[in-house]
Amino acid sequence: MMRAQSLCFLVSILVTILHVGYSQNRWDYYVFSVTWPPTYCESIQCRLPRGLRDFTIHGLWPTIFPNRQPNCTGSLRFDIRRLQGIRNELDLMWPHLKNYRESPSFWKHEFEKHGLCAVEDPQVFNQYGYFKFGIKLMQKLNLLKTLMKYKISPHDSRQYDTINLMNVLEREFGYNGSANCIRKPGRRGMYHLEEVHVCLNRKHEFMNCPFLGNCPKKFIFPPFQ
């Protein structure tokens, strides 16, 4: 019994050492960013996954208050083999929009830039946990369906109030978010919704985002073509 207890203690110490060895970075909260592909792909040639008709994940970013990115470092290296159990979800929810066939390189970039900080979170812990957390957030947010419930549906010319979008986030999740838009060329210069951000504390609870997006009072929510 004593030998078994000692072995368990040594294993727990080893796991802690390995985990702490991943990185030593200071950050305060998460920004979860989702992209609306029709806007993103208006000015960039995209190759989207077949059947994509929803927001996609841009990233899950540990952030220093109020809105600064830490320089994430650590010994853990990206390994695509560790994502096989969630590969189908990642292919559809977290694709590289310029070319979905190059998604693994996008995941590698996001993990090495942001995930090396996130693995310090015991609820994330490793590479698989980082991407699984992103998938769970995407499913919980279910943003397109949520917006459509409040009559904010994709349309090529209808304008929506940005304040209404913020109100939807507050009603559904209890806290505000932020939205970024792209101004289209031309005399009218309409703004198209490109990204929505929500924020979470280190307990994975929604919180008010301590920064503003750049969307003006009104925006267009363009449909997939």
Image: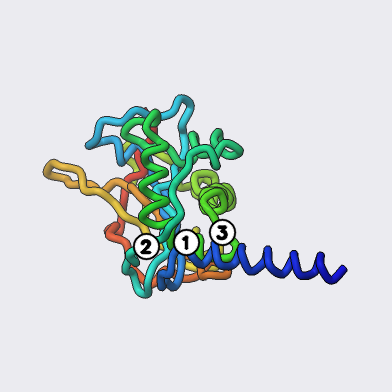
| Residue 98 at least partly seen | yes
Q: Dividing the picture into quarters, in which one does residue 212 lie?
A: bottom left
Can you name the residue that lies furthest to the left here? 187
Q: Is residue 68 above or below residue 160?
A: below
Q: Which residue is mark 1?
A: 22
Residue 72 badge: 2
Horizontal relation, residue 42 to residue 108: left or right: left
Residue 173 badge: none
Q: Nearer the viewer, residue 70 or 136?
A: 70
Going from N to C along the chain, the mark reached first, 1 or 3, is: 1
**Is mark 2 in CB contact (under 8 Å) with mark 1?**
no
Mark 2–mark 3 distance (CA, rounded to whole Å): 15 Å
Q: Dividing the picture into quarters, in which one does residue 156 lie?
A: top left
Query: Could you tell me residue 81's position as x and y percent?
Result: 53, 37
For the C terminus, which image quadrant?
A: top left
Going from N to C along the chain, the mark reached first, 2 or 1, is: 1
| Residue 165 at least partly seen | no
Q: Which residue is mark 3?
A: 124
Mark 2–mark 1 distance (CA, rounded to whole Å): 10 Å
Residue type at mark 2: give it. Answer: Cys
